[in-house]
Image (cartoon, rainbow, N blue to C red):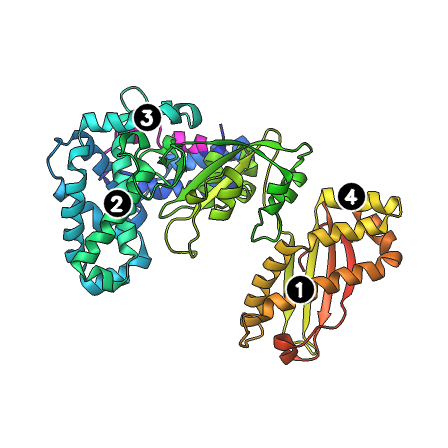
Amino acid sequence: MSAAQKLATKLFGQEAETMEAGSSTLAEISESFDMRLAQSLTAQGDEAVNEVIAEAEAETLSLAHDPVTDLDSARARLARQFEAATPGASPVAEVEQFVPIVMAALPFIRTGISIIGRDKVVKFLAEKLAGLIKKHIGPQAAQLIAAPIVDVGLRMMTLEAEGAGGASVLGAEAIVATLEDTIRAVGELPAEALSDPLRLEAEMHEAFVAATSRHIPRRLLVRDLPMVETVQDHGVWVYMPRVTRPLYRYKKFTKVFRVPISQPVARAIHFPAGDTLERRLLDAGARVWPLEAEVHLYETLPGTQLGHMAAFESEAQPAEVAEAVTEFEELTPEVASMLINEPGIGVRRPLGKGARRLFRVAAPGLRVRRVSRFSVRLDAVAVPPALRIHLRLSERESHLVASALSRKAHAQVIAQVRAVLGAPFRSALATRLTRHLQEKAGMPVAPTRPPMLADKLAESMLSAISAKLPTSATALAQAARDEARGVTMTFEFRFADKNALASGDPKSPTMTIRPGWHRD
């Protein structure tokens, strides 16, 4: 059992399932959970973890509510109300109480709502949404919806932990999640849409249908329902982690995709860090292709932190959980298409707005994680301005370089570095150059400048390695054989003046080679 799971068991146990969701205790435990989880992630060993747990048990908290803990309470309360409701009776009052709590937990939607008037929008949504769900509440409906969720989740996500007779909460929560997603989607609408009743109803209905297809098993819905995410009836999104019910911090897709990942597909999946899935799998120890792997899918909720998912989803040991957050990456439509052949389940959203979709690749014996492949340092006030790029080779890549150098296969070394400096690296470098030039150089940057500069820098780095390899081979070989992890190749570029950062070409770089990873 991981540190976070021990912590959750101590803090919640079975009491969390029966506590009054509206009580101050729930809000206090929710706040304490996040704080103690963060502490447990850095605790070294069972003794330290137990100390954190003891402190959590002994501590009496008097913390104010925040929007996320209020939403915890509201979800649990509404699910109980739906389980006990009379089918056919419109739950307007219950939904009307839920809507503003969802909105309060999503700061980016407040402006448009406030312009139109919160009460007006809340009443409109409550009446319409209550009418849409009134036939799908009550104990029988909850059991009907829960059954196919558990049928898949029992095998994939150990939803048997719901306990005897407790699985029906999954059905009630599916309706709650549908409402929550619908309210969030409506809240993102521009003020013009919110002020037009006809358009608002159309937008709300479309959002409701889409949310229904994400949370209600396909076999219970009408055939040919528009806006479904997946081609096959794979599964649905459920609130997680179940062990901390009713305090949820993310959603998980009930289907775990077991897929063979070919090397060309892994090579085609690029990440913002400047590398590919192929490099991560190879560095993790993949040697046979196609690689049989599991792909787990997640969706964020208000208040989600990667540490929440790492603590309950990763197989890392307690002391490694903080590093395990690097197992999660954005699930874009392109990645979803290549990895699981389901492009509709991927999303592309601006950071800080709306829910994010993430995925994690798991394979026996492998830890597939993100590493910092390079760093950029810009000194725009120096005379002349200096730009340093620290290129980091992994332990595996360093051994390949050392092996090639031992055979005097210099062309092979160049080919290896050229692969590292390929399209993913250049795209990531362009993104970082945009930020550095704007923030540190304080000058307007044409959109075409960072990609062009990134290409020039990458080509100059490759040329510098090729030109200096005969004289630097010994230093590179020694660094590659060093006990320190990996190798850092630092390239320093000088520009004629500050204006040259925006439009000029850099001079040929100096190159230094050091064992280990550096970012100075």
Report if the CB atoms under discs 1 and 2 are less than 8 Å apart.
no
Q: Mark 2 belongs to which amino acid?
A: Phe
Kindly identify which residue carries mark 1.
Answer: 455
Name the mark on residue 400.
4
Rendered image: mark on residue 110: none
Q: Earlier in the sequence, mark 1 or mark 2?
A: 2
Is label 4 in a helix, a strand or a loop? helix
First in sequence, mark 2 or 4: give its number.
Answer: 2
Q: Residue furthest left?
A: 89
Q: Residue at x 84, y 62 (%)?
A: 467
Residue closest to the eye, 65 or 376: 376
Residue range corresponding to the magenta coloring: 5-21
Closest to the camera, between mark 2 and mark 4, is 2
Q: Mark 1 or mark 3, which has the lower sequence index?
A: 3
Residue on which disc 3 sits: 148
Q: Residue at x 25, y 43 (%)?
A: 179
The answer to whether 109 is drawn above or below residue 367 in the figure is below
Q: CA distance from mark 1 to mark 2?
A: 45 Å
Residue 117, image quadrant = bottom left
* Residue pictured at 78% horizontal, 43% vertical: 400
For marks 2 and 3, give the CA distance.
21 Å
Q: Amino acid at mark 4?
A: Leu
Is residue 255 or residue 316 the one in the foreground?
Answer: 255
- Whether the residues at callouts 1 and 3 have beta carbons within 8 Å, the answer is no
- Whether the magenta-drawn stretch holds residue 20 is answered as yes
Counting from the top left corner in percent of width and height, residue 423 is at 63, 56
The correct choice, above or below, for 249 with respect to 463 in the image is above
Could you say where residue 389 lies in the image, as x and y percent from the top left?
Answer: 68, 62
